[in-house]
Image: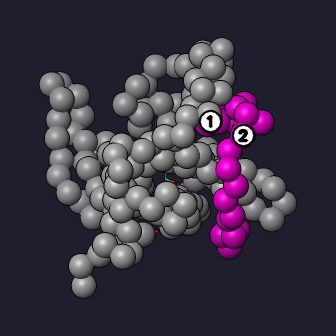
Amino acid sequence: MINTITLQKATIEDCDTIYCWRNDPTTREQSFNSREILYEKHSQWLKKALEDPKKFFYIGIDEKGKKYGVVRFDIKSKFSAEINIIVAPDKRGKGIASQLILKSCSLFFSETKRKLILARIKESNSASVRAFQKVGFSKLFHYKEEDKERILALVLLAPDRRIR
Ligand SMILES: CC(C)(COP(=O)(O)OP(=O)(O)OC[C@H]1O[C@@H](n2cnc3c(N)ncnc32)[C@H](O)[C@@H]1OP(=O)(O)O)[C@@H](O)C(=O)NCCC(=O)NCCS
């Protein structure tokens, strides 16, 4: 059975957890920057990012406070943002990603009044593409930079902007 996940704003207390998830080999393989990140660099980046009004971090937790994943939104314009997700390595393959994406997008839309969320994912990252599509993201286009992997761009519109 999938645990019910609720969201809380990430704080500097989540620094070590996010660091472990970000340096996990699968996360690195699926990231646009696959290099290992040094702890010092990560903690400095997170501290700055948490204070940045253009970044929103949500941690998915269960009723016992166990952490399941992190979702980050980077505001791109007055109406748009980009989403990134990492599910805890030992919690993958249990349907956590779609729950986290759905809840965090809904919260983000209501908190920021943004109208569009963009996800850019390596096309080979089937679990991620599937999780985003499952909650309503639509494929928009794909692109490729030089000899790198093909990237898929997907979008989700705020409920009040969807054309029926
Ligand atoms: C990608 C990621 C977020 C998926 O999280 P998850 O909780 O394991 O995903 P889910 O369990 O919700 O699975 C999503 C869907 O993909 C399917 N899936 C899972 N693993 C898969 C695989 N290896 N190949 C194909 N499909 C897969 C699942 O069956 C599910 O589909 P279904 O609901 O129709 O059965 C997680 O693996 C992760 O954190 N990876 C590292 C970081 C990353 O890639 N982030 C995404 C870039 S934005």
Instruction: Establish if 131 lies above or below 72.
Output: below
Q: Image point 68% across, 44% down: which residue? A: 10
Element class at badge 2: loop
Q: Position of residue 114 (x, y in %)?
A: 40, 58
Tell me the crowding category of disc 2: few under 14, some 14 to 19, or many 20 or more residues within 10 angstroms, Cα based.
Answer: some
Q: Identify the disc placed on residue 50.
A: 1
Residue occupied by mark 2:
11
Q: Identify the disc placed on residue 21.
A: none
Viewport quadrant of the N terminus: bottom right
Instruction: Establish if 124 lies above or below 6.
Output: above
Q: Position of residue 90 (x, y in %)?
A: 66, 47
Q: Is residue 114 left or right of residue 22?
A: left
Q: Image point 41% across, 37% down: which residue? A: 30
Q: Tell me how many marks there are.
A: 2
Q: Amino acid at mark 2?
A: Thr
Q: Are marks 1 and 2 in contact (CB under 8 Å)?
A: yes
- Please tell me whether residue 47 belongs to the stretch shown in magenta: no
Q: Amino acid at mark 1?
A: Leu
Q: CA distance from mark 1 to mark 2?
A: 7 Å
Residue 26 can be seen, yes or no: yes
Bounds of the magenta span? Answer: 1-21
Asked whether 23 or 54 is in front, the reply is: 54
Asked whether 137 or 122 is in front, the reply is: 137
